[in-house]
Image (spheres, coloured by chain):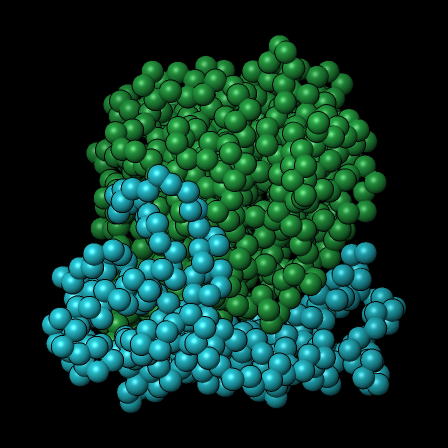
Chain colours: A green, B cyan
């Protein structure tokens, strides 16, 4: 007989960015909140301190901070004709694990999506004709505009202390910032990070060929910062151990550095770590959630009744729990009906590496989101007429750290091992740099998430099955961009270079991105989306499904800025309107 | 020393002089009066150790997983993958064989972070690792397969072959022209190459990268890393003796040359902890 806990106003399934933001806003409004976190408790001190955290093997290679696939993973296939097999070790993406979630090990690139992104389907058809998307493309409008969440982006940026320079203040374009961004009401809270030698070369070269470089907005703080919660954060040390690591300087925006000290003191908030939610419980009507069932650290089942349930886990786990709980109609690619699991999207990579003779780029000096950005080839910032694809991607010349197990670039034609490899690795470690694009991914009828018929996790529940491959828009954009890279390489005059475009088929083996998006998408039409624009599950309005699983398709940017903004938007709607009058928000 | 946290940042972290005085620092604990104006690195520079960890000692190293013939194979193979030459020591003297041995008896070798439930199917290359074997088993079966091939082809074990013949065998594994019965030869080779690079470039605490041979080869400074004022020294070489986790944990003098990153970070974390209470 499972133990039943005292009912609360709201329960968070997962305590990372979205769970932390919503818990904070709800408790401020007087609600009692329980946060259920399946991983361990962890905090900057002592968990992320040097020297222990500067261990490339443990963190970056053996995945210390990531979900353990032995306990729960996904199965994968490229298309419905194949049999999905379990992802036995994570590669392509690395879901986070533990308090703070992926927000602990992220790099910190913090974007606002372009204005065009929120009306992507209708704008693309209006501008390029009905045929541009293609028959199987299920890319949709978001149901909100950029202006609807401008103030929410601002709140997230000031919570973290994002370092950057505005490129568009109230419509006024500012050189040195990203001139393609939507209008913002005020400057970033902190000035841009200092930039590296390779970034200075890149900035000069790209300016010379008419592009618009800018120092990318970063959640690695350029100076010590007291955030909007009164929490003191440190300055970035440019230590080069950011992506896949926790931050010893409290300089990277995360739950731990922006909200946790307040939440831990908040009497209306109770954090329960090592608590793995198995399902959301619904009443006999199926239209109302009654709470959740979880396993505590010792494996005992516990029922936590709650008036509101927030799915605040990693995007993939939000969708998995909706499917396991039977909430919302599961998507069927054969009919196109159903919404849970629909429009899974991801991110594409197109990269260039440049090799020089005798330069000193010192790649070990860096920060996770220290990057010189180019947005000229993102979204609809360039004319797509005649190109037969939509979308694009932000280009980043990043110096996030030259940790040598994973970073030892060698020129094309170098053997993979032996004396020639060793000589090349020694010669070029400090004399090369590169850049990459975060390409958008459109939604297609055949790319989706559902429950696997064969494989199960440690709790005996079906694994989630991922069916995904690149489509027309991704392949064509990457090829086109590779062509653009040639001019970008040429002006920088390297000894040699390598340009890499998208693989023929998506593979789960090499690391690409942990920007897994969609599957519980937002929108204004209940037949085409899982949640409304306040993240409420249409069928069960006291369940809110947060995070990047709500993106109808993925933009050519890192997702966290938008994830944070949407969390603030939901928190506002719940505290100001929903609690007075529970039901579907309009 | 010219590279320091700016005074502005320091003041912003610590707040007022009163707040700073309320926070005991390592410097005051060491009997050196601290002032609010002192940047944290100056204060920290007066202490050599944080946490007071003593060296763990020099226990003898021995192979735990590999049998003697297996160890001979691995020692010879990693030395061909990263050979000793004019650029410096190769993988054998950097301890890579011992590193791999230690990895195979731990979480990696026993597949502690791998989904291990059937049914098993080879799948497509895009579906990734689908072997039923743990990495430790891949090595055992892979070495056996390679030795069988060597004995059949050269009538000698791998370790007894000339360097040229050893390279021939490794190329055959890499290129897929040599095949084994039980474990795919290519999968074995990929694991061996990946683990060799890990052992050569990973922190010495895992038994490889001895004398920081890998870090010295490429000029990687190791774990101590405060570069806030170095990052704008465009195109200037940065040469320091590399520093490992043990160097810092145990207060080795070499760690003191590294802009005192560890002190900085520890002081910073302690202060923020107090400020945010």
Left or right of A470? Residue A252 is right
Circle count: 0
Identified at 62% across, 42% down, the residue is A38
Residue A414 in percent (x, y) is at 22, 70
Left or right of A281? Residue A321 is left
Q: In the image shown, does A63 or A125 lie closer to the viewer?
A: A63
Indicate the quadrant containing the N terminus of chain B: top left, top right, bottom left or bottom right.
Answer: bottom right
Q: In the image shown, does A582 or A272 lie closer to the viewer?
A: A272
Left or right of A472? Residue A289 is right
Q: Is residue B116 visible?
A: yes
Q: Give residue B244's quadrant in the image.
A: bottom right
Q: Is residue A374 visible?
A: no
Residue A392 in percent (x, y) is at 34, 41
Identified at 74% across, 30% down, the residue is A3
Residue A222 in percent (x, y) is at 60, 61
Indicate the quadrant containing the C terminus of chain B: top left, top right, bottom left or bottom right.
Answer: bottom right
Identified at 33% across, 64% down, the residue is B139
Identified at 63% across, 77% down, the residue is B249
Vertical comparison of A140 with A247: above or below? above
Left or right of A37? Residue B164 is left
Residue A155 in percent (x, y) is at 65, 41
Q: In the image shown, does B16 or B90 lie closer to the viewer?
A: B90
Q: In the image shown, does B205 or A574 lie closer to the viewer?
A: B205
Q: Give residue A314's quadrant in the image.
A: top right
Task: List the single residue furthest toward the left.
Answer: B153
């Amino acid at each position: 007989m499972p133990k039943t806990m005292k009912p609360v106003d709201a329960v968070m399934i997962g305590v990372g960015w979205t769970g932390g933001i919503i818990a904070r806003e709800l408790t401020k409004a007087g609600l009692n909140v329980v946060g259920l976190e399946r991983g361990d408790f962890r905090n900057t001190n002592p968990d992320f301190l040097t020297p222990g955290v500067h261990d490339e093997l443990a963190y970056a290679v053996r995945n210390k901070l990531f979900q353990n696939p032995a306990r729960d993973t996904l199965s994968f296939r490229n298309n419905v004709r194949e049999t999905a097999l379990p992802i036995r070790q994570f590669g392509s993406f690395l879901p986070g694990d533990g308090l703070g979630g992926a927000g602990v090990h992220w790099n910190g690139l913090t974007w606002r999506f372009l204005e065009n992104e929120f009306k992507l389907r209708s704008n693309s058809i209006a501008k390029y004709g009905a045929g541009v998307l293609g028959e199987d493309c299920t890319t949709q409008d978001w149901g909100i505009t950029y202006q609807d969440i401008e103030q929410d982006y601002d709140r997230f940026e000031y919570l973290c202390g994002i370092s950057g320079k505005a490129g568009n203040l109230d419509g006024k374009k500012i050189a040195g910032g990203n001139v393609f961004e939507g209008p913002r009401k005020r400057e970033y809270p902190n000035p841009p990070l200092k930039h590296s030698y390779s970034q200075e070369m890149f900035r000069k070269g790209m300016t010379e060929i008419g592009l618009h470089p800018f120092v990318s907005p970063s959640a690695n703080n350029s100076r010590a910062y007291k955030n909007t919660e009164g929490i003191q954060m440190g300055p970035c040390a440019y230590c080069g151990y950011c992506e896949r690591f926790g931050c010893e300087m409290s300089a990277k925006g995360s739950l731990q550095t922006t909200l946790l000290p307040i939440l831990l003191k908040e009497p209306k908030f109770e954090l329960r770590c090592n608590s793995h939610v198995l399902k959301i419980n619904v009443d006999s009507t199926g239209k109302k959630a009654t709470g959740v069932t979880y396993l505590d650290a010792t494996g005992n089942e516990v029922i936590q009744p709650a008036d509101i349930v927030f799915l605040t886990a990693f995007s993939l786990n939000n969708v998995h729990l909706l499917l396991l709980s039977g909430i919302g109609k599961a998507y069927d690619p054969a009919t196109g009906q159903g919404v849970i699991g629909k429009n899974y999207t991801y991110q594409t990579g197109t990269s260039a590496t440049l090799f020089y003779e005798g330069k000193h780029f010192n790649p070990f000096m860096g920060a996770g989101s220290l990057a010189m950005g180019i947005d000229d080839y993102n979204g609809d910032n360039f004319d797509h007429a005649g190109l037969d694809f939509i979308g694009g991607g932000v280009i980043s010349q990043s110096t996030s750290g030259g940790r040598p197990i994973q970073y030892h670039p060698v020129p094309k034609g170098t053997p993979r091992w032996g004396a020639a490899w060793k000589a090349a690795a020694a010669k070029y470690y400090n004399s090369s740099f590169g850049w990459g694009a975060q390409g958008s991914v459109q939604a297609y009828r055949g790319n989706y998430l559902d429950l696997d018929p064969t494989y199960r996790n440690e709790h005996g529940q079906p694994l989630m099955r991922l069916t995904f491959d690149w489509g027309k828009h991704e392949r064509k954009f990457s090829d086109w961009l590779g062509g653009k890279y040639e001019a970008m390489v040429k002006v920088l005059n390297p000894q040699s270079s390598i340009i890499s475009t998208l693989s023929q088929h998506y593979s789960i083996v090499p690391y690409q991105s942990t920007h897994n998006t969609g599957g519980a998408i937002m929108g204004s039409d209940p037949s085409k989306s899982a949640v409304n624009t306040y993240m409420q599950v249409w069928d069960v309005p006291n369940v809110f499904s947060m995070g990047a699983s709500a993106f109808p398709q993925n933009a050519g940017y890192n997702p966290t800025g938008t994830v944070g903004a949407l969390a603030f938007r939901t928190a506002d709607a719940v505290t100001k309107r929903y609690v007075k009058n529970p039901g579907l928000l309009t | 020393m010219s590279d320091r946290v700016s005074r502005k940042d320091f003041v912003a972290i610590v707040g007022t002089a009163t707040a700073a005085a309320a926070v005991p620092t390592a410097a005051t604990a060491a009997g050196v009066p601290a002032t609010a104006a002192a940047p944290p690195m100056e204060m920290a520079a007066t202490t050599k150790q944080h946490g007071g960890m003593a060296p763990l000692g020099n226990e003898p190293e021995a192979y735990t997983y590999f049998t003697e013939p297996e160890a001979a194979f691995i020692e010879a193979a990693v030395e061909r993958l990263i050979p000793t030459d004019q650029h410096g020591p190769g993988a054998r003297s950097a301890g890579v064989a011992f590193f791999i041995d230690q990895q195979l008896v731990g979480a990696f070798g026993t597949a502690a972070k791998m989904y291990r439930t059937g049914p098993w199917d080879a799948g497509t290359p895009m579906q990734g690792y689908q072997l039923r074997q743990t990495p430790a088993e891949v090595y055992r079966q892979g070495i056996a397969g390679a030795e069988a091939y060597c004995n059949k082809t050269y009538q000698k074990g791998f370790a007894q072959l000339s360097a040229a013949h050893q390279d021939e065998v490794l190329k055959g594994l890499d290129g897929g022209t040599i095949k084994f019965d039980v474990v795919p030869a290519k999968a074995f080779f990929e694991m061996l190459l990946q683990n060799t690079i890990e052992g050569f470039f990973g922190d010495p605490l895992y038994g490889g990268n001895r004398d920081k041979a890998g870090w010295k080869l490429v000029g990687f400074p190791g774990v101590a890393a405060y570069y806030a004022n170095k990052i704008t020294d465009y195109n200037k070489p940065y040469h320091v003796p590399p520093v490992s986790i043990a160097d810092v944990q145990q207060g080795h003098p070499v760690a003191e040359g590294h802009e005192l990153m560890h002190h900085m970070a520890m002081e910073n974390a302690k202060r923020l902890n107090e400020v945010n209470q």
